[in-house]
Image (spheres, rainbow, N blue to C red):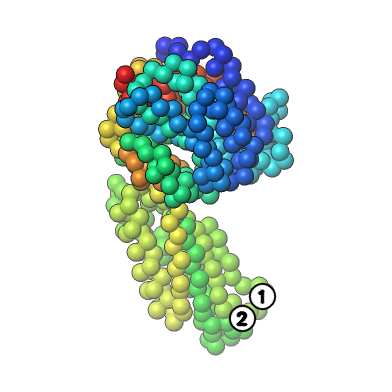
């Protein structure tokens, strides 16, 4: 069991209220206006200067207490485009939108930490509380960075946290280096020569070329990626043809690539290009590869990971801070902040009871029992990194 966090009862109750209010009113990428209002008003009531408008709906508040280092703590504001099926009193009031990833809880935990730190000021230096929009698909974290987040709010390091329903409550999980995958997407357009379905010899069959590409692309992982390296290449869409007796001029393939480091990512992209050109040449078709870089990997720096481990261990003990977890093939746009500043992203256990729904499940609900521990983690990190 862990030590009961030092967060006071009124802040605990306030965190539950914020969390459930935000949960009932989910908003998606760059439309988190109501959520941003709730966050900004709460921070203003704590007496903090509040900046709004980075990445449209981003909110940043700054708490300064004398001279010292500066630190940025980040939470995410957005919900998902999916229908909630749970029946709690605070279930989503918006059809087709739902807080199924726990960003409502992340926001409440960071607000709770801000309330505690503003009241007691147990540190020397500057804390920036960063609430970002659009984590799920739209890269709100990237937009905040591009719009000058760290120029306007200089920080020596930046930290993020996500709830992990598969990890028991009272545990944390983190690793040095890559924590989440690099997410890329691709679109391959195969152009042959359209012809009558009965006379393929008069054309170049884009469907046959595309089919060979699907198979050839599988050799990137099976034959070109080392057994101890990681990559996923998935063709997830094939679009070609409209009727029975026409060989289509073009066929389009789409899919996704996931890797765990930039070198394997670059090699995978180059191999795709080579295979596209080779298969095209074999058949006299043309093949155009449009490879799009999505979210980079969350790469935790060593010193900041050690700081995060130490802060978490001060609350739950070293045995319940797992530092050897495998990287996840999912992605997270906190990566863009980590490209600009050293920092660390930690998972906080939210699992309780049997069969807790995973994130992005229509029955998922953030576990309010972890709100005090999450807020206490932020407080512990600030006390440790910004000592009096
Ligand atoms: Zn999510
Ligand atoms: Zn999430």
Give the image quarter of residue 252: bottom right
Res. 280 in view: yes
Whether residue 211 sits left or right of residue 37 in the image: it is left
Other residues around mark 2 within 10 Å, as few (<14) / some (14–19) / many (≥20)? some
Q: Secondary structure at mark 1?
A: loop
Q: Give left or right: position of 26 versus 202.
A: right
Query: What residue is pinned by disc 2?
Result: 197
Which residue does the image show at 53% across and 31% down from the upper left? 107
Residue 104 circle label: none
Of 266 and 92, nearer the camera is 92
Residue 80 in which image quadrant: top right
The C terminus: image quadrant: top left
Which percent across, then down, holds residue 233? Answer: 43, 56
Task: In this rendered view, identify the residue nearer to me: 340 or 227.
Answer: 340
Near-viewer residue (39 or 105): 39
Residue 100: give x, y in percent of width and height. Answer: 59, 36
Please identify the quarter of the rendering in which residue 62 is found. Answer: top left
Q: Which label is found at residue 244? A: 1
The CA span between labels 1 and 2 is 7 Å
Q: Is residue 346 visible?
A: no
Direction from residue 263 to residue 216 in the image, left or right: right
Mark 1 vs 2, N-terminal side: 2
């Amino acid at each position: 069991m862990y030590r009961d966090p030092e967060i006071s009862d009124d802040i605990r109750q306030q965190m539950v209220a914020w969390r459930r209010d935000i949960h009932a009113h989910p908003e998606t990428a760059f439309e988190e206006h109501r959520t941003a209002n709730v966050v900004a008003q709460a921070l203003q009531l704590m007496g903090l200067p509040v900046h709004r408008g980075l990445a449209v709906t981003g909110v940043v508040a700054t708490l300064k207490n004398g001279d010292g280092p500066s630190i940025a703590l980040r939470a995410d504001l957005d919900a998902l485009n999916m229908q909630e099926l749970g029946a709690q009193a605070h279930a989503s009031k918006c059809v087709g939108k739902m807080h199924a990833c726990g960003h409502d809880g992340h926001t409440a935990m960071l607000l709770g930490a801000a309330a505690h730190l503003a009241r007691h000021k147990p540190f020397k230096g500057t804390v920036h509380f960063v609430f970002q929009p659009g984590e799920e698909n739209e890269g709100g974290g990237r937009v905040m960075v591009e719009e000058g987040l760290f120029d306007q709010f200089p920080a020596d390091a930046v930290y993020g946290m996500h709830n992990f329903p598969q990890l028991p409550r009272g545990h944390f999980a983190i690793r040095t280096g890559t924590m989440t995958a690099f997410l890329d997407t691709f679109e391959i357009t195969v152009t042959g020569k359209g012809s009558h379905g009965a006379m393929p010899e008069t054309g170049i069959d884009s469907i046959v070329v595309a089919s060979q590409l699907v198979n050839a692309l599988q050799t990137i992982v099976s034959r070109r990626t080392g057994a101890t390296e990681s990559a996923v290449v998935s063709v997830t869409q094939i679009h070609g043809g409209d009727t029975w007796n026409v060989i289509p001029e073009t066929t389009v393939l789409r899919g996704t690539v996931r890797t765990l480091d930039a070198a394997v990512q670059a090699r995978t992209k180059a191999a795709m290009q080579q295979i596209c050109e080779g298969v095209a040449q074999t058949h006299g078709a043309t093949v155009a590869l449009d490879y799009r870089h999505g979210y980079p990997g969350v790469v935790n720096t060593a010193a900041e990971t050690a700081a995060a481990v130490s802060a978490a261990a001060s609350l739950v003990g070293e045995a319940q801070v797992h530092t050897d977890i495998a990287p996840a093939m999912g992605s997270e746009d906190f990566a863009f902040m980590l490209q600009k500043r050293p920092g660390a992203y930690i998972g906080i256990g939210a699992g309780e009871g049997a069969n807790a729904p995973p994130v992005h499940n229509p029955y998922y609900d953030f576990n309010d029992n972890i709100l005090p521990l999450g807020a206490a983690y932020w407080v512990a990190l600030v006390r440790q990194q910004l000592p009096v």
